[in-house]
Amino acid sequence: MRLITFRSAVDAPARLGVIEGDLVVDLEKLGAKVGLPIPSTMLDLIDLGPPGLSTLRSVLDEWREQWPMGVARPLSNVKLLAPIPRPRKNIFGIGLNYSEHVAESARTLDTSKELPKQPVIFSKPPTSVIGPGDAIEHNGNITQQLDWEVELAVVIGRTARRVPEQDALSFVFGYSVIIDVSARDNRRAGQWIYSKGQDTYAPFGPCIVTADEITDPHNLDIWLTVNGKTKQESNTRFMLFKVPALIADISAAITLEPGDIIASGTPDGVGAGRNPQEWLWPGDVVEAGISTIGTIRHPVVAV
């Protein structure tokens, strides 16, 4: 399933939906039509766990060829929001998780040239999240080094505490695209949250593809363009720490809960690693995508 959060109009409330071809099915309305309570938010759906998803699949299979009146509308007529517009807690960011990105960071950002022996973890607050098409803010009073990083987002589906690596993928609800926007000149004594956690610095979407449709999250093409020019192009197979290792490592000390998001790291090609270095400026347009999931596109605006 390709699950989304959307608005049917600018001033309409957020709705939970699923993409079916070129249509969006409003899941709460579908539930009301067929006499089955279906949650109205992504977090509430995730909270239902695997049984809830199984029930939803059955309902969609039953009604796919004959959607009840008023339940489905053209995808082109809705505004997509971040799949989880307001995460319950900080996003878990993973730094230096592709070997070539480690090398470029060592050249230009004073990080170690040695491959990390454990995942490098930071966080981005819920207020950093924006949805497809929303603007990335460039505050010239704060940064002159605004950078991009495309990443696979991993959404946790059930409570994970001290999870063995071999069991970790069973705790994944689904996958999405996230851009880890960074103000490189805002790092403070090795701490990254101010650099990476500012408002609008986590573009997220366009949907969550449920884990049953991505059996191998380590064979996905991943890319990012700025003004139509390719800046990053790689594959998730090149992660140093794969998704199961990340879940096992974090959950060894920090309980992962339903709806938690892990931004799993970026490949090489970031602006800071280029010669000469390149940065985002007002008027630029950033587009990022991952095969099987989709793309998100964001203008950069001055604030």
Image (tube, rainbow, N blue to C red):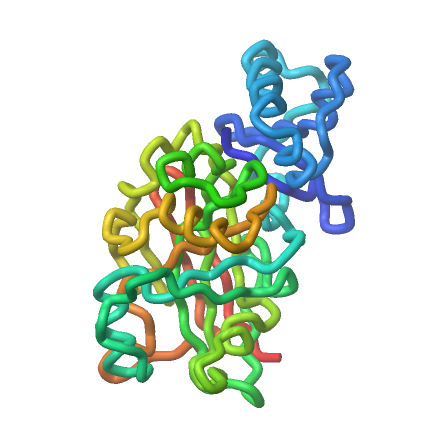
Which percent across, then down, holds residue 281?
46, 78
Residue at screen point 41% across, 40% down: 164
Relative depth, front residue between 249 and 33: 249
Q: Quadrant where the C terminus lies?
A: bottom right
Residue furthest to the bottom: 141
Say left or right for 200 vs 219: right
* Residue 249 in sight: yes
Above or below for 48 versus 5: above
Task: Locate residue 207 relative to residue 12 in the image: left or right.
Answer: left
Which image quarter: residue 274?
Answer: bottom left
Q: Position of residue 124 (x, y in %)?
A: 55, 65
Residue 64 point in image, percent of width and height: 56, 15
Q: How many marks?
A: 0
Taking the image as drawn, is residue 230 in sight? no
Q: Residue 52 at x, y = what percent?
A: 63, 24
Q: Is residue 246 left or right of residue 110?
A: right
Residue 219 vertical position relative to residue 225 in the rendered view, above or below? above
Q: Residue at x 59, y 50 (%)?
A: 82
